[in-house]
Image: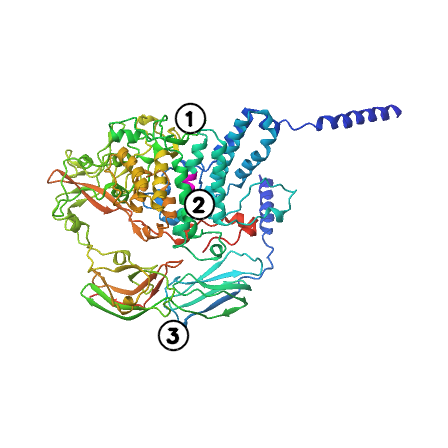
Amino acid sequence: MKKILYILSIAFAGTYFAACHSLDLAPLNVIQDKDVFNSEAGVTAYMATLYRALPIEDFFYKPEGSGFGRDWQQFYHPGALCGELCGPYGGTGDGAQGFGYWPYDNIRTVNYLLENLPANAKNFDQTKVNGWLGEAYFCRAYFYFAMAKRYGGIPIIKQVQNYPAQSIEDLQVHRDKEEDVWKFIGSDLDSAYLLMPETSVRGRANRYVAAALKSRAMLYAGCIAKYGSVNYVAGDARNQGLVGIPAADANGFFQQAFDAAKLLEGKYDLYKKGYPDKVKNYVDAFLDPSSVENILVKDYSLTTNTAHSWDATMTCRYMTADGLSRAYPTMELVERFGGALPLTNADGTPRRFNTTAELMQGLQPRLLATIYFPGATLRGRTFDVQRGIYKHFTGTAAAELGTNPPNAQDRILSGSTAQLYPENDPNGIRVIGFTGVWTGGDELTRTGFYVRKYVDYNRDQSACGLYMSTQSWIDMRYGEVLLNRAEAAMELGNKTDATASINLLRDRAGAPAANEATITIDTVRNERLIELAFEKHTWWDLRRWRIADKLLDNTKYHALLPYYVYDEKKYIFLREVEPYQRSYTFDKKWYYEPIPGGELGKNPNLYPNNPNY
Amino acid sequence: MKKTASIFLGLSLLAMMACTKTDNLAGPDSGFQGNLVDATAGGKSNVLTETGGMQIKLEELSWSATPTPQYIPSKPDGTFEDSQLFKGHYRVTPYGGAFWPVDPIELDINGMTSHDFTITPYAHITGLTWQLDTTTLTMNFKIDPPVKTGLPQIIDVRSYINVDKYVGAGATISQYTDGSLDGSEQIRCFESINADWNETMATKTFTLKIRNLKRGRTYYARVGVRFNDSFKSSNLSEIFQVDVK
């Protein structure tokens, strides 16, 4: 009995006391602060999680649904909500209310670094520490910018919140005023600029990246102040300043945007390596990884499983290995480059062309480099676009597009490239082209055009599958900074500076120079819409200028549709409403997205929601 | 085999039994109805609107201070009714139409509850005349805003036409509403204004035309004036019937 008691007490003491020691160890499978903040590799890894989470609206980005996720369907492009593209969206409302973006977890990651890195600063050279802190400020500004442009005023959280140390009531923060959020973004970017060095490794921020972002963000704030105080939706959130900025503060923001953009002068430049061929040069500006124009890029690779599907989903299967396309540039966008295309003669009859490619003669190099026209070539194949055949065609284009088209009975369309005219004649001519326009679905062009920007023409067709494209996304480039500068300068009344910036771009684009005497804010805005086409800026630009509800007011977009005139053996082009005849309307309340419902449920202090939600 | 079958039978019986308990909450047995009365017509007539042209916003305050609102759309005759509401205390607001904003009121909805709202539309369409010339419909009218100070900017005047009586900005045949078919200024079914109210507009007679109506059809038409307020909503005329022979 005694023996058993001894054994039991020894066993008890042995396990119980010994256990205390080993259980006091920090868990080995959780990375500790000392591992992260004591070594350069640790901080770099910590930074990588931040950069990975940055809301860069890249190839993958969709304005709704999976948002910043990795969906293959890159034709769900925000440009398809607002007239840049005719795409899969049925209307503007399909993507106008966002996907509940709410990155306070990422902001916490930044705040945690800002609080804990200085305590470990003795391990490093002070310049390095400053650089990292600067990057953290830059990332925080980036997150807040992405929210401010969606929701207006949101809570500003500068410290790490702790639960249960802080009560739920303390954590249920209130929204800050929209103006304060934009000022906070500006001040974070100022901190970032002061702390960071002049250069950085690829894909990470330096002081000029912060300045470029500041020029973009402050331009947004200035426009919201200036135009949002005229065109707005009334409601409690507006009365409390949670959305909207006093008009009097507009110029202060514009001045900050201008000053920030000016900081980059001489540090970056427009890409001109491919001169004198201005078309090739402009195409390569988006594909050459060594471009001096790139300020911040996001890279992709097959080995890290991050590759995207731009090539496979922006042109049709005729040129690719997999996937399909569903978004096509509109005629309205094409006409922004240099006015109406020369489709008709002076008497109103359609011009006759020997080949569809003839239309491209004399067009602006930047236009041809941004959009594939009928007759252009890619990977050895021609964009064979033909809407149908007219057995013969008489009269004007306008009459044919009116309510009683005189040639309608002579027009043949088809849903298949196999259909010939005359039917059953082995020498017949195909009714439609291999790349559209058919009467079937929307996997071939609806507008006659395809996107060219960012399409990698050097890539073999067999390498153009889903998740196989690796060209970098250029999140910020010097071209945009020049446009930010020109727009801010125009808003401040400095036409000389605005004209000079615009003309740098126009020279590179192969477009006629702008004239200081005639330049207006619309000149600058139009330049922005074409220079940054498909770069996912237009949706935000039309919103911040508060003109989206005017441009998108039951609006239909147009197509360039080539027909073969059988008896003349010539081509004509008609400017028709795109075949789906979709109409786009922007509801004014969409100038702000609603605060996500789940967040409102967790925190009643986020009320009032934005007007009319 | 038999054993498995009986186990399955037993399980499915159990599963079905689980559903038999009824909840003890009252169903949506209350309702809310009423009129949107035009304040400027001596309280005698309703505001001319269309299906969903205005809404009654309901916020049930019984459970939460920040409820998710629900809406009752208006009917074309300026009435509204929802017979499937829960009994409770609500904040209600006429909302989303071309009328001067009014303050919300709070009331208890219990059984079928009635309440009329008196609202002042931005404008009336007056002196509407129309004539049909074979297949072209011409409409003449004036705009008369009861309150002129602070009136939102006028975007445009537009004609609306449909093959049934539900016609308005949200129910129209687009090719007859969206544009001048041959690009000329004389023949058009809308007129852009984009200006604040001025005295020239008070005396002006607006003329809109719809061309190429299909023969042998009966159409219903009306005109509207659209304001650049928070909703870009329209005041509409009465509806008239057009028989195209």
| x and y, in percent, of residue A175 in the image | 53, 49
Marks 2 and 1 close (CB-CB < 8 Å) = no
Q: Report the residue at 66% width, 42% height from top.
A: A165
- Which of the two discs, 1 and 3, sits closer to the camera? 3
Q: In the rendered view, would you say A585 is above or below B103?
A: above
SS at circle 1: loop
Label 3, on which residue? B41
Q: In the rendered view, would you say A376 is above or below A167?
A: above
| x and y, in percent, of residue A212 in the image | 41, 36
| x and y, in percent, of residue A496 in the image | 30, 41
State the CA–CA distance, disc 1 to disc 3: 71 Å
Callout 1, which amino acid? Leu
Q: Report the residue at 30% width, 33% height from top.
A: A317
Check disc 3: other Cα within 10 Å, few if <14, some if 14-19, many if 20+: few
SS at circle 2: helix
State the CA–CA distance, disc 3 to disc 2: 44 Å
Callout 3, which amino acid? Ala
| Magenta run includes residue A218 | yes
Residue B192 is drawn in which quadrant?
Answer: bottom left
- Which of the two discs, 2 and 1, sits closer to the camera? 2
Judged left or right of residue B197, residue B111 is right
- Point out the stretch of residues depicted in magenta: A214-219
Whether labels 3 and 2 share one chain:
no
Which mark is on residue B222? none
Judged left or right of residue A166, residue A261 is left
Q: Which of the two labelled residues, at mark 2 and mark 1, occupies the earlier sequence position?
A: 2
Check disc 2: other Cα within 10 Å, few if <14, some if 14-19, many if 20+: many
Label 1, on which residue? A302
Give the number of callouts.
Answer: 3
Label 2, on which residue? A149
Q: Report the residue at 60% width, 59% height from top.
A: B24
